[in-house]
């Protein structure tokens, strides 16, 4: 049987489009299966290493054309707990940077990635995959109309419920939290400049991310039932809660978009690739949006996939299988480290036990006072390798 492409990428979210366009720009023949999906109204804070990768892969040009610089992070412990953490400010200048990263609208980022597609080597179809199987050295995907496509390497960028992951028999563990994230755009009475502001409450952070001028993107993590209840009360009830949660520090706020609630879970996989399948983005990892790690990790997947393909000998008939194994080995450490860090951080934010409170408060005091520890925290948070 002949192959239809070198690589088939399944899924048209940010990770899938970054992978499809990045791989085609690197000279591979790619078919991208991207069925229509509802517009993504979220924003993504991408740290400097991710922004540098996007520029070097040709996926974006100047970040300021698309997004807003994140120059500082302020953490305010707003819990009524016995042992509270000090207010802490992390400034990018401390580590010699003009910004930690940039905040982008997901829809604008996706459109920019699509514009970066090369004139040849990438065929995009708005079709979904219904099955995957191996046929010798080739992976075979079945489409909704019953037709099939073959390629040595199949990239599963088909999100948390990944069909490619399940069909390839890659085990995943998912844990659903009682918490969810409410997101919306806000216009503030007082601008926050380039500072991202996190209020830590007992059920998670309430974070305002700079979106230029007086605008901020809100990511509010709290109990799902509570967030849905507030949302159901309509925009006026929501604004009352937002003023209260932000401690009225930003003057009169108005809603600049509808609000959306995203249930939260963590998802981890045994390995990110095998049998000629490579998983990128949320098909391989998901966690609550704290410390802005999700898409940053997804872009590191794409970066390592490009490196694995560069290392493999495409003269070997089984190169797709070799590339998937190499990719899994490259991703193992980063996935375990980042997943573990976000999980520990999230659970420590929610923990009501006194020892956890003391540890978290002590940790923030240490970060406030000890420059070497602060530098290390910056490096981990930014995903430096
Ligand atoms: C509230 C919130 C805020 C966040 N903020 C940040 C942040 O600031 N920084 C950051 O780095 N990350 C952030 N994240 C994480 C980030 O949004 C995700 O990591 C990223 O959007 C995942 O992209 P993806 O392409 O892997 O998955 P998805 O966006 O879920 O895309 C999967 C795609 O696959 C398609 N698909 C599914 N099944 C099939 C099939 N059978 N055939 C073909 N296609 C299929 C779907 O239609 C979909 O388009 C946030 C997440 C949330 C919930």
Image (cartoon, rainbow, N blue to C red):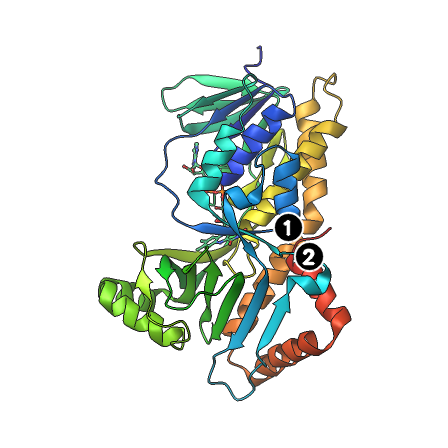
User: 63 and 82: which one is in front?
Assistant: 63
Above or below: residue 145 compared with residue 254: above
Quadrant for the N terminus in the image: top right
Taking the image as shown, residue 206 lies to the left or right of residue 238, namely right
User: 27 and 355: which one is in front?
Assistant: 27
Residue at image point 62% right, 28% down: 276
**Residue neighbourhood size for the residue with mark 2, other residues' Cα within 10 Å, grouped as few (<14), some (14–19), many (≥20):** few
Q: Which comes sooner in the sequence, label 1 or label 2?
A: 1
Above or below: residue 77 compared with residue 155: below
* Cα distance in 3D space between marks 1 and 2: 9 Å
Percent from the top left, x then y, of residue 215? 41, 58
Above or below: residue 261 compared with residue 349: above
Q: Secondary structure at mark 2?
A: loop
Percent from the top left, x then y, of residue 331? 68, 44
Q: Is the residue at mark 2 in contact range of ligand 1, meaning its CB lies under 8 Å from it?
A: no
Disc assigned to residue 48: 1
Which label lies toward us, 1 or 2? Answer: 2
User: 102 and 285: which one is in front?
Assistant: 102
Percent from the top left, x then y, of residue 136? 62, 19
Residue at image point 63% right, 60% down: 340
Q: Secondary structure at mark 1?
A: helix
Disc assigned to residue 97: 2
Quarter occupied by residue 318: top right
Residue at image point 61% right, 77% down: 360
Whether residues under marks 1 and 2 lie with C-beta atoms below 8 angstroms apart, the answer is yes
Residue 164 in view: no
Disc assigned to residue 149: none
Above or below: residue 155 compared with residue 170: above
Residue at image point 58% right, 10% down: 2
Percent from the top left, x then y, of residue 385? 73, 50
């Amino acid at each position: 049987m002949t192959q239809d492409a070198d690589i088939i990428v399944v899924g048209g979210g940010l990770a899938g489009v970054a992978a499809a366009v990045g791989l085609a720009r690197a000279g591979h023949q790619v078919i991208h299966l991207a069925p229509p999906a509802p517009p993504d109204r979220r924003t993504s804070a991408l740290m400097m290493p991710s922004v540098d990768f996007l520029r070097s892969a040709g996926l974006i040009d100047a970040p300021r054309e698309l997004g807003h610089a994140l120059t500082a992070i302020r953490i305010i412990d707003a819990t009524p707990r016995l042992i509270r953490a000090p207010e802490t400010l992390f400034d990018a200048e401390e580590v010699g940077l003009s910004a930690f990263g940039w905040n982008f609208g997901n829809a604008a980022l996706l459109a920019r990635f699509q514009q970066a597609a090369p004139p040849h080597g990438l065929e995009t179809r708005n079709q979904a995959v219904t099955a995957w199987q191996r046929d010798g050295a080739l992976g075979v995907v079945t489409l909704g109309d019953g037709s099939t496509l073959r390629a040595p390497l199949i990239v599963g960028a088909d999100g948390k419920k990944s069909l490619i992951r399940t069909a390839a028999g890659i085990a995943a563990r998912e844990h659903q939290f009682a918490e969810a994230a409410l997101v919306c755009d806000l216009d503030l009475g007082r601008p926050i400049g380039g500072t991202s502001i996190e209020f830590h409450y007992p059920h998670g952070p309430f974070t305002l991310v700079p979106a230029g001028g007086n605008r901020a993107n809100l990511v509010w993590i709290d109990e799902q039932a509570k967030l849905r209840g507030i949302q159901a009360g309509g925009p006026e009830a929501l604004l009352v809660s937002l003023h209260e949660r932000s401690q009225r520090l930003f003057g009169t706020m108005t809603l600049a978009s509808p609000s959306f609630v995203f249930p939260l879970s963590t998802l981890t996989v045994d390995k990110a690739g095998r049998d000629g399948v490579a998983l990128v983005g949320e098909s391989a990892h998901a966690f609550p949006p704290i410390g802005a790690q999700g898409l940053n990790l997804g872009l590191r997947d794409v970066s390592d996939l490009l490196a694995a393909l560069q290392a493999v000998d495409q003269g070997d008939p089984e190169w797709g299988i070799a590339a998937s194994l190499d990719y899994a080995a490259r991703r193992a450490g980063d996935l375990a480290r980042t997943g573990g860090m976000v999980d520990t951080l999230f659970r420590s934010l929610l923990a009501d036990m006194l020892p956890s409170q003391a540890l978290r408060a002590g940790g923030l005091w240490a970060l406030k006072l000890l420059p070497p520890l602060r530098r290390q925290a910056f490096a981990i948070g930014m995903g430096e390798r």
